[in-house]
Amino acid sequence: MPCFNPEDYQVRAIDYLTSTPEAALYMGCGMGKTISSLVAASELFSEGAIRGVLIIAPKRVANITWAAEVAKFEETSWMTVANLRTKEGMDMLSRGEAHIYTINYESLPKVCPIIRKMFSRKKLPFNLTIFDELTLTKNPSSERLKSYRNLLREKVDYHWGLTGTPLVNNLLDLFGQIRVLDGGKHMGKNFGTWQKEHFYTSDFAGRKWELFPHLKGVIEASIEDMCLSLRREDYLDLPDIIVEDVNVPMERDTRKMYNVLKKHRYTPHGDLHITADSAGVLVQKLLQLTGGGIFSDVDEEGEKEVIEMDTAKVKALEKLVKKLKEPVLVGANFTHEQERIRRHFPEAQFTRDCKNDAEEADLISRWNAGKVPILVGHPKSIGHGLNMQDGGRYVIWYTLPWSRELYDQFNCRLSRRGQGEEVTVFRLMSKGTIDDDVAEALRNKLGTRETFLTILESLENN
């Protein structure tokens, strides 16, 4: 078993974590924040400072990544891992038999009350909590985080947050991330109060919040003592990411429906109807149409149908796959897009087909072994924390997401340490449509809310 030989920036991260009980580590994708935090925890174990670690992470990362990383190096392989999504894991927790306990964010409301009751009169078997992919805590009113904050936080001594995409371009998103770590010491406990003290609305509808000019830099300075940012471009000599847009013209009938829906927010199709009763729904439906299909309105029986319009993007994908002749990772945002791809590519495999954690782990393992020619998934299912750089060097976006975080995280599955080839990201684009608006918003590196508002403004002005 190999020893862990940290890079200089990883030594810096480890030293920072071990000396900072409430720490936000903003460490670029693929820089090794998982192993760095494990080594830091190992050092605290050896000093007797901690008795266990609770890791809260996205589901696939909690199930796959952490246990695999623990077993990878001699310095960390001595630690036992218990998955709290299993009965065996909960039994180990009750007896305090593991060093590391993993759980996904969605399970917190169910698991936190059980843990609180289980240890109502004694210490928890962990006193360090790691929030993996800290940006998932950006919603300060999240019920998932309330359950942790109200039931467990006061019994934990160390809180670390890890992420490669801190969304520093949207300072509003920092409040929730910092509060979950420090309990409100730096920014306070009330988001509304903090927001009004530092931001003002810049539009009539009150949708856009701008930082008061005289407070520029003040927010970052106020949390400087608990944050460390290490950017991958400053430390890693990674192969370049090449982005190549592939123009896929919409077929005539599809374009006609697109234009009508965009203008009137309604269009009939035979006996079916398509209505966009809000700006958000309009964005989603226009994105669907550029992919060749769209969901109809829900009928009286509560059902909706998929209206298949054309196969232009599927054919473009097929042409690209034949040209590359290597495994490809495909991002598709809608279920009917994935089914359209499934019909044309019987050899493709889909993350949504995995029925349990073992099947998910096996799929990622086979991808890294070069045994999956086409791997298709929603960007949320193939993102944070998964190491997939051994399986290929080509990413294809069937439909772009309007979340910069999802976009970056998906691309970083292949562009990370260990990737020896230049990574190319192909984007199937219907020029002159909402695809262009999404690509422009992503290029500007805006936060999710700003991206969405930018897209809406573009639709309104064109």
Image (tube, grey):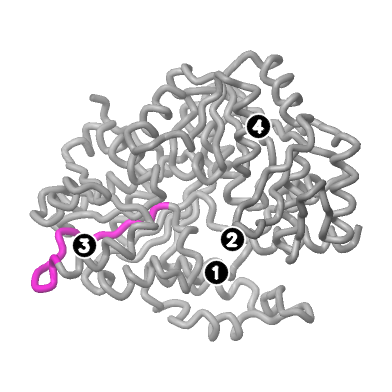
Which residue is at 66% across, 28% downward?
424
Q: Residue at x 68, y 75 (%)?
A: 209
Name the mark on residue 220.
1
The answer to which of 333 and 203 lies nearer the viewer is 333
Mark number, residue 232 = none
Real-space CA distance between mark 3 and mark 2, rounded to the nearest whole angstrom: 29 Å
Say which of marks 2 and 4 sits in front. Answer: 4
- Looking at marks 3 and 2 on the same chain, the residue that comes earlier in the sequence is marked by 3
Q: Nearer the viewer, mark 3 or mark 4?
A: 4
Q: Which residues are magenta?
A: 118-132
The Cα atoms of the two marked residues, 3 and 4, are separated by: 48 Å
Q: Nearer the viewer, residue 115 or 168?
A: 115
State the separation of the CA atoms marked 2 and 4.
Answer: 37 Å
The Cα–Cα distance between marks 2 and 1, rounded to whole angstroms, is 9 Å
Q: Is residue 341 left or right of residue 21?
A: right
Q: x and y percent of residue 313 in the render?
A: 75, 31
Magenta span main SS: loop
- Residue type at tag 3: Asn
Q: Measured from the top left, where is residue 196 in percent x and y?
A: 61, 85
Secondary structure under tag 3 reads loop
